[in-house]
Image: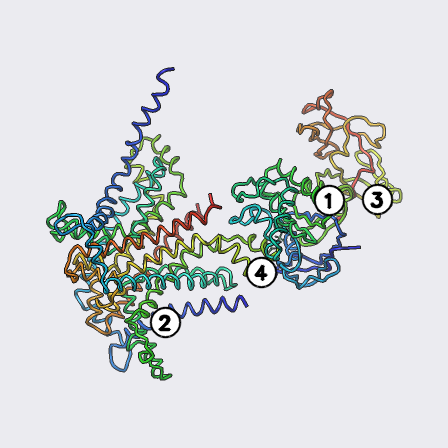
Amino acid sequence: MPEDPSAPRLRHKWRMPVEWLGIVPFLLFALLFLILPTMKIVVGAFQTPEGAFTLQNLADLNTDSIRSAYWTSIRLSLITALLGCAIGFAMAAAVVFGGLPKGIRSPLLTFSGVASNFAGVPLAFAFIATLGPVGLITVWLRTEFGINLRAMGFNLLSFNGLVITYLFFQIPLMILIIIPALDGLKREWREAAEVLGATGAQYWRMVALPILFPSLLGTFALLFANAFGAVATAFALTGPQLNIVPIKLFAQIRGDVLGNPNLGYALAFGMIVITALANFLYIWLRVRSERWLK
Amino acid sequence: MSFLTLTHLEKTFGQNRVVKDFSLSIAKGEFISLLGPSGCGKTTVLRMVAGFETPTSGGITIDGRDVTGLRANARNIGMMFQAYALFPNMTVADNVGFGLKVKGAPRAEREARVAEMLKLIGLSDLGGRFPFQLSGGQQQRVALARALAPRPSVLLLDEPLSALDAKVRVSLRNEIRQIQQELGITTIFVTHDQEEAMSISDRIVVMNGGVADQVGAPFDIYNRPRTRFVANFVGTLNTFDVQVTDPAQGRVTLAGQSLTLPDAPLASSVGQTLSVALRPEALRLGRLPDAEALLTARVTDVHFMGSVIRLKAEMAGALVSLDTFNRPDAPPPVVGSEVEVSLSGRDFIVLQG
Amino acid sequence: MTRFFAWAAFLLGSLFFLLPLIGMTEFSLKARRGEYSFDAYMRVFEDQRFWDTFSYSLILAAATIVVGVFLVVPTAYWVRLKLPQARPVIEFITLLPLVIPAIVIVFGYIRLYNTSSFLPMTGSALGTDILLTMGYTTLALPYMYRSVDTGLRTIDVGTLTEAAQSLGAGWVTILARIILPNVMVAVLSGAFLTLAIVLGEFTMAALLNRPAFGPYMQLLGANRAYEPPALAVIAFAITWGCMGLMQLVTRLSKHERAKA
Ligand SMILES: Nc1ncnc2c1ncn2[C@@H]1O[C@H](COP(=O)(O)OP(=O)(O)O)[C@@H](O)[C@H]1O
Ligand SMILES: [Mg+2]
């Protein structure tokens, strides 16, 4: 009996690394093209050009222009994520529960798949052709109704214009993710609530929304990150002048407009911190709200 | 005095008439089962009572009040579903207290009622658990407590046991019946399991194709089925063809033996063939003094089921099933042996249609 | 009442999505004064740079798909078969590209793989192309991995592997002849999504200075009036085509299974 306890331990020690070898290519790829590049940014944010440790880069972020860029980016991401979630939810709920013809559902899902991927440069073109200075709707409103959008303060190449444009991919993304979640709501839950005396609003507030909460939250975090990191749409729409973080970083990478290479690291590091915070918040809330899940 | 009445209920989905001229009157405190094969419209009837479906025509009254046009949340009904209808995001206690909470009952009253209900179903210790932490049987007991907590006037159960395994099913159905009698609550229970229906109901409604074929106490339904469908659905049947010899006295012959049928006089003429049926337990093994006729049968199969032994045998040109009680001192006949079978005309069911 | 609001939500939403599509189409047809024409499209198609950048992006998309398949299929298979304990790690990594903005990743590339680094990939055109392909692979990773992993869930990886091994098949044979055909639908739908992503990608290609389709579109947008909406229509059609193909393979495979 003396060798018995040691034998399995030996085998255990041997087998682990052999099996982990199978995912070494993947881990190597992730290391080289995902983790190391990110680490480079993080480390660089705390280094002087000569390589010494410093907090000066982060301190240098505290200028009016950079603060306002972050603030604009955060607002833009929050607003488009909120509106995207709300409108996408309304459309998904309309299709799943609203008694619309069954035939609508599949085209809506297909279209959402297309629209959520129709981002970037061509999306900006589409909105310029529609709401730009000589766009379809702008001209139509002016000639038919004498409404001058520009005089009313609307400008596509502004914060509000960006919000409207981003919604074109934010809403479909929400629809794609939330329709399966809505399908997961069992008819019995609704009927049980109703027969127990609950109104429709009570059912939504006490049963359906708490059950959907993790999905809603996850989608919100995803939409937030999606808007926060988006470069192409904003760049094609407004060029390099709009003061949001990704555009600023884009200009910095291209031409060191900040006049300090390591300030670029700090700028990018700030982006990572914000999207990571958003996701940690999501994970934390999700864990708290999902005690009732296995 | 009837408490819950359904009058000439009809329900049509598109072209499909799912419930046809369904009338039923249920007394206060009665336990009624709707029994029938899948797709015969049981759930649809129940959902009309609950208020989830609007009848195409006909009416529903509860305690004298016409509820036909009322929404489900205004009917004060308790309902239990097939499975997994507990709110997964709430603890057991919150599930049970849900009905009182939406009605705005004060917290103290709610908590007292929840405790009372959990005690009733024997799960007092599990109030803080979430549904996924319970077994299927426990979940359904919580569902029952949740349905009963707001003191509904009627309890509706739609195959609440069908997702459970056999042992739990039997114990839980007895528990449901016991609680129902304790509270004296008027109950409609939907099932496709005839044994379940017969064991716990005051009366059974056998449904077939959206129509109530027969309404009656389990004893009557089983022993005096009015149609071939009902007879077949509520138990095993052995059918024979007999020749009428005396219509006025109800006398017939089967394999040369003379028998007197219960539903005499028969509306048929001498020499006519009649289709009759016998339950497996009406074919009695051995030579019995009170029997009218004695036939021999060749055993082809023996199923030992515990208290009952079911034999398959060839008799009078037909393959029959016959049940006999287990006796420790008498082993069952072996396959291939010849046995004597006693039968009596009064046990026969004359089948119409 | 519910139905009224449902229709209202659906129709208003649809209007929001249709108007830009109508807008870009209408605008793209207005290149000739006073009448609709396809002039803008003609000019786009006559532009050699359109074809050059488009085929460049197409080649990179193909390379991305190949790299992605070689990376994802064996890994997902291995994790299901032998390393379920590694699943959280792998899933975390595959979700990272949704959290770390692409512009940050490519910034890291530029600084990490510059001419004076241990792996001077940005020093040559080929090296940069490889780097860009790897970048696209990271962007596609979340979708590719999910798709393949879901596909693997529907087959019994363990039994298939044991059956193949008992017939003497090696790992390469098992992956290429048994596993890959079984997750082909998942791979294809991941591939079409990758194609859609790569063809429209702007940030990485622009910052790595490669002549891809995204930067070309941007450049044209800054200098022309009618060609950009025409390009948008073309890009939309391509995206739609990719999604359509994705649905098609899924539907065809369901059909096949129903027949079998
Ligand atoms: N909402 C509905 N729409 C259309 N047909 C229905 C609907 N509900 C039930 N049916 C049909 O009505 C018939 C009876 O269904 P149901 O009452 O559920 O039967 P049971 O509960 O006895 O199995 C079935 O043929 C079913 O397909
Ligand atoms: Mg049913």
For label 4, count other residues whose C-alpha is less than 10 Å away and answer few (under 14), some (14-19) or many (20+): some
Q: Quadrant of the N terminus of chain A?
A: top left
**B301 relative position to A223: left or right:** right
Report, in whole angstroms, how far the alpha carbon at label 2 lies from the one at label 4: 37 Å
Tag on residue B332?
A: none
Report, in whole angstroms, how far the alpha carbon at label 3 lies from the one at label 4: 55 Å
Asked if B328 appears above or below C90 in the picture, the reply is: above
Does the image show residue B200?
A: yes
Tag on residue B181?
A: 1
Report, in whole angstroms, how far the alpha carbon at label 3 lies from the one at label 1: 35 Å
Which amino acid is tagged 1?
Gln
Mark 3 and mark 4 on one chain: no
| Residue A290 picture location, percent across and down | 45, 48
Callout in the foreground (3, 2): 2
| Chain letter behind tag 1 | B
Mark 4 beta carbon near ligand 1 (under 8 Å):
no
| Chain letter behind tag 3 | B
Callout in the foreground (3, 1): 1
Which amino acid is tagged 2?
Leu
Which amino acid is tagged 4?
Thr
Secondary structure of the residue carrying tag 3 is loop
For label 1, count other residues whose C-alpha is less than 10 Å away and answer few (under 14), some (14-19) or many (20+): some
Labels 3 and 1: the sequence-earlier one: 1
Mark 4 and mark 1 on one chain: no
Asked if A284 appears above or below A164 in the picture, the reply is: above
Q: Which residue is depicted at the point 36% across and 39% down? A: C80
Tag on residue C19?
A: 2
Secondary structure of the residue carrying tag 1 is helix
Q: Which residue is mark 3?
A: B263
